[in-house]
Image: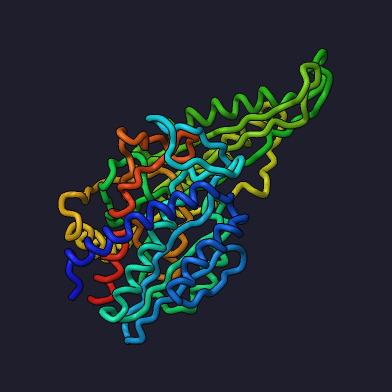
Amino acid sequence: MIKNTDLHEKMNELDSYMRETRGYLHRFPEISSQEWKTREFLKEEVDKLGLPITDVPGTGFYVTLDTNRPGKTVALRTDIDALPIQEQPNNLKGPRKWVSQNEGASHMCGHDGHMAVLLAAMELLVGLKEELQGKVIFLFEEGEEIGSGIGAMIETIEPLGIDAIYGTHLTSFMPTGQICIDGGPRMAGAAVIDFEVVGRSGHGSRPDLSINPVFAAANVLTGLTSAWANQIDVSKTVTLGLTQFHAGTVNNVIPDTAFIGGSLRYFDVEEGHKAMGILKSVAEKTAEAHNCGIRYLDTMRFATIPVINDELLAEIARIGADELFPEKVVEGVQWYASESFSHYAKVAPSVFAFVGIGNEEVGSGAEHHNDYFDLDEDALRYSLGATVKFAINFLMD
C-alpha cells in the first residue's frame, strides 16, 4: 500500500523540478499547432525515464507506462500550447519570476504549469511502478486553445482500451491550493459566432441609393440583448459574448457588409442549441426589416461541448485529494470558459479538476488570457498530488 506520507515525500523531492520545468516552458512558449520545440523538450524529459512515445498527427503525442501486471488503464492529460499574447513584464504584484522570450507568445492560461505537473507525475509514477498494476497513458495534446489537436488525439487513443481519463486546469479565481473535483457540468460548451449582415454599398452622400448594413447590424445587437433577457431559461444560463463589430473602411462609403463575431457559452446542451436558434432568428428577421440579409461564415459552429465530470470518477478523485490535502477540497465551482477536454468523454469516463493558483502576495490572480496572468508555483504540488493520488486509487481499486 502506498502511504500518503510517502507521496508527500516524493512530491517534495519533485518540487524544484516542477518549478524549473515550468520556468523553462514559460520562457519559450509556442502558440497552438506550432509547439515543435516544446514537443522536443517534453520528449527529451520522457526519454530520461525510458518510456515509449507514440506520436499523434501534428505536435501531440502520448507516453505509456506499463506495469506489466494486468489491470485497468488510466490516462492523464496536459495541453501544451501557448497563446498569441504579448505578456506584461509584471504580474499584479511586480516583476515576474519568468518572462516569455518569444515575441507575441505567452503562457497566459497556465499550460506551462500543466506540462510541468504531468512530467513530475510521470516521474513519480515510474518510481512506484513495482507497486502498481495496469497502465498509465500520459497525453500531451496540441492546440487546446483552438481545438486543433483534439480530433487527432481522440482518433489515436480510441483503440487503447482506456478506462478513465483525468485532467486538471490551474485556475486563477481560486486561492492557491484549493481543489475542486465535483461531478456533473464543470466547464461550458462553446459555439463560435461569425456572421455578416449583407447590404449594398454606395456613396455616403446618398444612403437612400444603397442598403446600409451598419444600421441593420446595430439593431441586430440591440435585438439580441432583449431576446437573451426574455427567451433564455433563467435556470439554464447561456452567456452571449459578442466581441467584434466591423464595418467599412472610410467615412464616405457605405459598405456591403457588417461583421459580428463572438461566442456562446452554455452548460445545458439543449439550451445552447436553443440559444443559437434565437440568435439566428433575431439576426435574420432584423436584417430583413432593413432589406439586408445574413451570411453565416464557415467558422460559425458549435466548437466544444460542456466538460461534464463522471460522478464516480469525481468521487474517487475528490476523496483521494482530501486524503492527501485535508481541508483543501471545496465544492460548487463552475467555469464559463471552454475546454477541449470535454471530447475525451467520447473515449472513456472522464474527470477534470480545478486547482487554485491565486495568491495576492506573489501577484497571481489575473484572469486567464490576460497579459498580467501569472501562477503561484506553490500550487503545482497540489495539482501533482491530486493527479497521482487519483491514478493510484483508480488503478489499485
Residue 122 vertical position relative to residue 300 in the rendered view, above or below: below
Residue sitting farthest toward the bottom: 69
Residue 200 vertical position relative to residue 395 in the rendered view, above or below: above
Number of numbered discs: 0
Residue 232: % across, % down = 42, 38
Kindly tell me whether residue 171 is visible in this rendering: yes
**Residue at the spot x=70%, y=35% of the render?**
293
Q: Nearer the viewer, residue 216 or 361?
A: 361
Residue sitting farthest toward the top: 205
**Residue at the spot x=38%, y=43% of the render?**
375
Q: On the rendered structure, is 360 left or right of 98?
A: left
Q: Which quadrant does the C terminus fall into?
A: bottom left
Q: Quadrant of residue 65?
A: bottom left
Q: Nearer the viewer, residue 393 or 226?
A: 393
Query: How has the structure been colored for display?
Result: rainbow
Residue 97: % across, % down = 42, 40
**Residue at the spot x=33%, y=59% of the render?**
309
Residue 55: % across, % down = 57, 71
Q: Which quadrant does the N terminus fall into?
A: bottom left
Residue 160: % across, % down = 46, 78
Q: On the rendered structure, is 300 left or right of 190?
A: right
